[in-house]
Amino acid sequence: MTLKPLAIAALATASLCAGHAAAASAVVPPSLGWSQLWTTSHSGDAEIVDFDSTTNTLWVTGASGIDVLSLSTGGLQTHLDLSSFGSVNSVSIFNGLAAVAVAAPTITDPGTVRFYNTTTFAVDGVVNVGALPDMVTFTADGARVLVANEGEAKDGVDPLGSVSIIDVATRNAASPTVATAGFGGVSLPAGVRSTTLADIEPEYIAVAPDGHTAFVALQEANAIATLDLNTNSFTSVAALGTKDFSQPGNAIDPNDRDGSIALRSVNARGLYQPDGIASYAANGQTYIVSANEGDARADESDEARAGTLGVSGDLARLTLSTLDSSASDLVAFGARSFSIWDANGNPVFDSGNQLEMEAIARGIYDDGRSDNKGVEPEGVSLMEIAGRTIAFIGLERTTRSAIAMYDVTDPANASFIDMIVGTSDIAPEGLKAFAVGSELFLAVSNEQSATTTLYALAPVPEPETWALMLAGLGLLGRAARRRR
């Protein structure tokens, strides 16, 4: 097994055991070595992945159920067929208890969260929640489960979006304790992309490090809401605004039919519209990391080509939001980047067009998506490695699976580390970075290829550190020769 891009010198100090990379412990990593340990193909699809430390397994959701995989080999241990209950959207695991979000067969009906013992696979509670539970997560103490009920419209029915807060201790009670946080009493600021409360559709939840607050991505509305977990109510909604593609560092390729891949400054803006989000603390402050995928409504009634507004030439193919655009002010879906925001939704950092530049450099940029959201950053996972906070950003629309790695320890000065490119994977949907003892891993579930891949990670010390270490080894060698 070869770690990439580890220098030969790294092998002298990073112990590799049973195909897993042991993490260096005392060196700040300017880069990360990575190695693909295994890839498993699923008989159905693969969307969200989580790790169970109790059984050393990965749980991977598909629409019809869950595949439970061995961490060491990727082998299928069992398949939980949940198709009779509806469509599986998400899974989260805490201390041997798995919470699974299941949309009802009619997605506008209330869904459920089904709990499973990860050792016996026995059902350990079923709780009713809102319509189309799209994402589920435990709080850090495992006491509560938060559920993003998207409430997507279908066949003329448009249920209200909400977040369910489940008291885990009551999950088997005749009437489990479930609070529902809705948006009826929340003031929506200018810039929130909605015409009615039914347009507010929670997509993803990130619990703040203090455990008292959660942030909820409202993707189609281009906003992030703040949820007070002490009162189980929303306290604010922050509109995220737009990204100017005419500014330096923000250039895009807006045309999928011009016969070339070329990023250029264009007179258009992009809605951030994050899908996956995560939260972390730095210097005593709370921050939110967002993967700015972009998304129209489910029925695509709010999108059209710029050409339908009379735009000609290079921008005519660009897919626009009809709610936000005019012929002289073009607003597209997605920012083709990831961003960092403070706890109030103020921008702190944006990756500009670096994700697309790196995809182009690696020959995996999909020009067929140039007109529509580009590389589409989809998911995000955070992990602390050697005292640094590392963000893993999955790109859904590249020709091969791509995961960008950034050091976000200093939120205002996040820096690109490397990009993991999968060998046989396409469209990473779910990411989970985790540690087992001193070993570091990244699990990626890929929707289009229906595969899950496990990577080992290892910090690579700075060149100056290696020079000192090698010089020290040379001195030791000379001393040993003198003793002989």
Image (cartoon, helix red, strand yellow):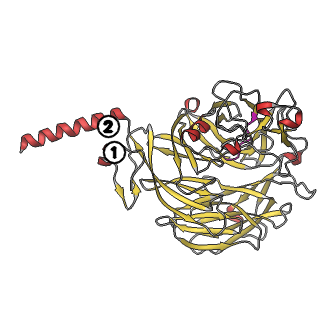
Query: Does the stretch in magenta take in 335?
Result: no
Q: Which residue is nearer to you in this view: 234 or 257?
A: 257
- Label 1 Cα crowd, 10 Å radius (few <14 / some 14-19 / many 20+): some
Indicate the secondary structure of the residue bearing disc 1: helix
Q: Which residue is nearer to you in this view: 394 or 88?
A: 394
Image location (x, y in percent) of residue 68? 58, 68
Residue bearing mark 1: 10
Report, in whole angstroms, how far the alpha carbon at label 1 lies from the one at label 2: 8 Å
Answer with left or right where residue 334 lies relative to residue 66: right
The furthest residue to the right: 156
Query: Does the stretch in magenta take in 271?
Result: yes
Examine the image and state in which quarter residue 348 appears. Answer: top right
Residue type, numbered disc 2:
Trp
Image location (x, y in percent) of residue 410? 54, 32
Answer with left or right where residue 7 lies relative to residue 274: left
Marks 1 and 2 in Cβ contact (< 8 Å): yes
Image location (x, y in percent) of residue 301? 88, 47
Stretch in magenta: 270-276
Q: Is residue 104 above or below residue 84?
A: above
Residue bearing mark 2: 466
Residue type, numbered disc 1:
Ala
Q: Is residue 102 above or below residue 148?
A: below
Q: Residue at x 53, y 53 (%)?
A: 422
